[in-house]
């Protein structure tokens, strides 16, 4: 018994399982479609390509979630740096010693110059 003796349903199932398990990529499916008329006809089945597209959509969703988390973290850091910048500006104005001490402490905790980090974060958010 050779591979050409197998029924179409079995070949279609093999292709579906290969696409669902990511064992067969787009390139592999196209190569199979080129290999024979029978496999070309079977590879045109929409369910086969649906599995490939579904995997890609899942990857895109995960990427979007990761990007959203990164943007939230950047926005929080930007807010924190804005607070430090305002505190450094407020150090130049006379204030009670308690307020002045707290603002000085905020400014000293920031090791990177606030203005350069703020511009870098603004550019990162724009990207």
Image (cartoon, rainbow, N blue to C red):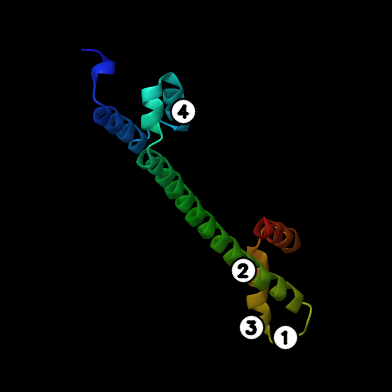
92 over 127 or under it: above or below = below
Outermost residue toward the left in this view: 1
Sequence-wise first label, 2 or 4: 4
Residue depicted at x 77% and y 85%? 94
Q: How many marks can you see?
A: 4
Tell me the number on the disc at residue 30. Answer: 4
97 over 23 or under it: above or below = below
Residue 54 placed where, x, y %?
Answer: 40, 46
Tell me the number on the disc at residue 95. Answer: 1
Residue 23 seen in the figure: no
Q: Callout 4: few (<14), some (14-19), or many (20+) C-alpha neighbours within 10 Å?
A: some
At numbered mark 1, what does the secondary structure look like: helix, strand or loop?
loop
Residue 4 placed where, x, y %?
Answer: 28, 17
60 sits to left or right of 83:
left
Front position in the image: 100 or 73: 73
Quarter of the figure with the N terminus: top left
Tell me the number on the disc at residue 106. Answer: none
Front position in the image: 92 or 51: 51
Q: Kindly identify which residue carries mark 2.
A: 80
């Amino acid at each position: 018994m050779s591979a050409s003796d197998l029924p179409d349903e079995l070949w279609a199932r093999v292709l579906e399982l290969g696409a669902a398990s990511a064992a067969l990529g787009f390139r592999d499916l196209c190569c199979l479609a080129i290999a024979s008329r029978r496999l070309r006809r079977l590879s045109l089945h929409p369910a086969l390509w649906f599995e490939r597209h579904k995997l890609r959509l899942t990857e895109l969703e995960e990427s979007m979630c990761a990007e959203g988390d990164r943007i939230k973290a950047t926005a929080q850091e930007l807010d924190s740096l804005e607070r430090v910048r305002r505190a450094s500006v407020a150090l130049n104005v006379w204030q009670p010693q308690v307020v002045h001490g707290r603002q000085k402490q905020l400014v000293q905790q920031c090791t990177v110059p606030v203005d350069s980090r703020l511009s870098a974060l603004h550019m990162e958010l724009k990207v």
